[in-house]
Amino acid sequence: MDKFSVLIVEDNLLVSTTVQDILTDEGYRVECAETGKSAQKILSKNEFNIVILDMMLPDIDGRSLLTKWHKAYPNIVIIIMTAYGDVSTAVDCLKSGAYDFLTKPVDKTFLLKTLSNCIDHLNLSKKVNVLTQLTKRETDTVVMGEIIGKSPILNKTIDMAKLIAQSDFSCLFIKGESGTGKGLFAKTIHKMGKRSGKPFVELNCSALPANLIESELFGHKRGAFTDAKEDKIGLLELAHTGTLFLDEIGDMDVTLQVKLLKAIEEQIFRKIGGTVDVTVDISIIAATNQNVEKLVADGKFRADLYYRLNVVPIEIPPLRDRIEDIPSLSDHYVNVFSRKFGKNIEGFTKTAKEAISNYSWPGNVREFRNVVERGCILSKNSLIGNDELLFPDIIGQESNNSDINDNLPAMPLAKAENLIIKAAMTKAKGNKNKAARILGVHRTTLYKKLEEYSISVTDFI
Ligand SMILES: Nc1ncnc2c1ncn2[C@@H]1O[C@H](COP(=O)(O)OP(=O)(O)OP(=O)(O)O)[C@@H](O)[C@H]1O
Ligand SMILES: [Mg+2]
């Protein structure tokens, strides 16, 4: 492990050498300064991860140093040291950017725990910075053009998205059936907006039980509940300065909705078990494929949260209402998957094109993309034919007017089974029970098959 470096700014030598000895023994690289002036000199020449700052220095007030350094050195974590019982100073300092505080005389266990929290925080900030850099690099090339389609109805939605992206909106509600591109729109609006380059943090509200969602969102203090072994930073805090994307918000527990609404409106919240307010600056994008108005009428979604989110609503139309988009989506995905699988596929045969445009695409663009992917895998020549439109729904729809037995492609049964299971898992977004229902088998049968073909659920979530 790289050594973390600590600068102790403290005029009481007994205190500074005690802290220095403890930290040096633990493998930290430590330097000490007795005055604000000498500390400033050291900081200007060397890099430090952590500064432990006394509030009562002989030449300057520790608080003004805290404010100055917090701005000048955003990557340094500052811990302040106060006299025992001086809680109001400590709270003021936390508000001015201090990460934590220690009281004198310094307790060894407490000191080491505080430093270990700092290191977790530093490691996490590093990760967030890397993610931010990645997002920034993507931003340089991103255009709304990533959203494929030329239909008037989609163009209208794209124009609306552009307008929203240009404003520093506080809430945006994206509605639309599953697979219409809500997630894609959310990311694109973030990338095109004023918060591009800042964190884009995503939470799927249907994926976890309510208590876990709460601690994911708000974070918790150690000991706040039985499983809270460590302090945890919540997604609201991680999304600070950027965007929090709450997917499938229709599934969020009603009591949690109240807490979320308060956090959105005030941009202030407390960690579970926490005593200090955390202030954030975030935009919220929420999405759902459910009929929220009905959920509100049924008392399953709070009207006040709905009205707050619905200030700027945007509805992505289903693919069946914009079949004009199919040719450009088809060109795009044929190109993507043909290259991916090293093939030279140009498109669909005439009959396959007909089948595609007659189909209702209940899974929307996601289903379309998967069909093209499978078609590209199965196709033996430059055009994808009806034979390769091998997926449960199309087989179901087509069985009325064509003979599937004649159309089945020649391939080992195991390969076909593997492909169909993957198709069902894609459609069910990794939900094994749902996939088993689509396939018409008992879920234990599906579990066995997933194991047999080494298919990992996480690939589909
Ligand atoms: N207009 C589009 N152009 C290109 N790709 C698209 C378009 N719309 C959706 N997609 C692709 O389709 C897939 C599904 O989109 P996405 O996950 O955004 O849908 P969603 O509405 O969030 O679905 P769900 O409600 O199931 O979460 C993604 O791979 C996405 O990139
Ligand atoms: Mg989605």
Image: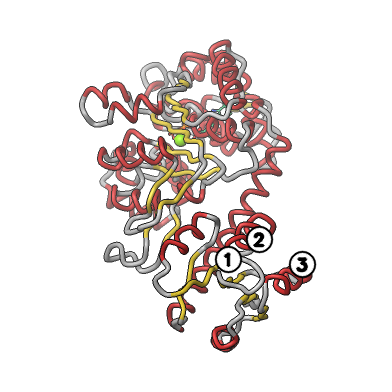
Label 3 with label 1: CB-CB less than 8 Å:
no
Query: Seen from this angle, which residue lies furthest front?
Result: 58
Give amino acid for label 2. Trp
Give amino acid for label 1. Ile
Q: Which mark is residue 387?
A: none
Give amino acid for label 3. Ser
Q: Is residue 91 above or below residue 209?
A: below
Query: Seen from this angle, which residue lies furthest right?
Result: 45
Q: Which mark is residue 78?
A: 1
Residue 389 appears anywhere in the view: no
Element assignment for label 3: helix
Precedes in sequence: disc 3 or disc 1? 3
Report x, y in % for residue 249: 37, 35
Query: For this rendering, which residue is in front, 409 or 192?
Result: 192
Element assignment for label 1: strand
- Residue that carries the numbered disc 2 in the rendered image: 69
Label 1 with label 2: CB-CB less than 8 Å:
yes
Quadrant assignment for the C terminus: top left
Q: Which mark is residue 44?
A: 3
Q: Could you tell me how far apart the alpha carbons at marks 1 and 2 are, in whole angstroms? A: 8 Å
